[in-house]
Image (cartoon, rainbow, N blue to C red):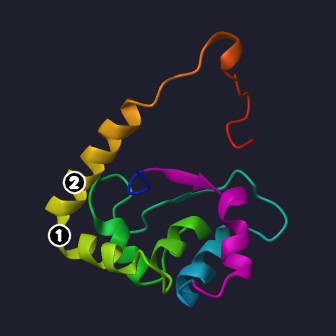
Amino acid sequence: GHTIGLARCVSYRDHIYNDSNINANYSASLRAICPFSSGDDVLAPLDVATNATFDNRYYTNLLSNQGLLHSDQELFNGGSTDAQVTSYTTNSTAFFADFTSAMIKMSSIGVLTGTSGQIRTNCRR
């Protein structure tokens, strides 16, 4: 789902200042808009190439170490998901099919209600 949308500086600051698995030029451009200790609400696109289009370009960004969030770049960082990321860069049909399947599976997750549920005023916590 990170092929579209924006993230706040507070969400990607640690990645651009502390991680080594990020493209140096990309990191520098993000540091220019997201200072080390301020600017928490500054937004950057999750997909640097086509942030307003639902497509597979997000995965190409990962191959170039241009994942905005640490968790995004971990998908392509020498681990077990590298092959899947690479596959999605050249096979948008597979990406769209897998995304559809995943969304259908997620829709079957039961929503907790009443005293079994939880209302969050801050979804990050």
Q: Is residue 77 shown left or right of residue 123?
A: left
- Say if 102 sits above or below 59 in the image: above
Magenta-colored stretch includes residue 17:
yes
Q: Is 82 rendered above or below residue 2? A: below
> In this rendering, does residue 69 appear at all?
no
Q: Residue at x 73, y 70 (%)?
A: 14
Q: Please provide percent x and percent y for residue 23.
A: 53, 86
Height in image: 98 above or below 91?
Answer: above
Q: Which secondary structure, mark 2?
A: helix
Q: In the rendered image of this protein, does residue 5 appear above or below residue 50?
A: above
Left or right relative to 64: residue 50: left
Residue 41: give x, y in percent of width and height. Answer: 70, 50
Q: Residue at x 45, y 78 (%)?
A: 76
Which residue is most to the right?
Answer: 37
Residue 102 x/y as whole percent: 33, 46
Marked residue nearer the N-terminal end (2 or 1): 1
Q: Residues within 10 Å of mark 1 (few under 14, many from 20)?
A: few
Q: Where is residue 112 drawn, in percent x and y?
A: 58, 20
Residue 65, can we see it? Answer: yes
The residues colored magenta run: 5-21
Q: Please give the residue where the numbered disc 1 appears in the rendered image.
A: 91
Q: Amino acid at mark 2?
A: Phe
Hey, what amino acid is under mark 1?
Asn
Which quadrant, please, contains the C terminus?
Answer: top right
* Label of residue 96 in the image: 2
Secondary structure category for the residue under label 1: loop
Q: Residue 123 lies in magenta, yes or no? A: no
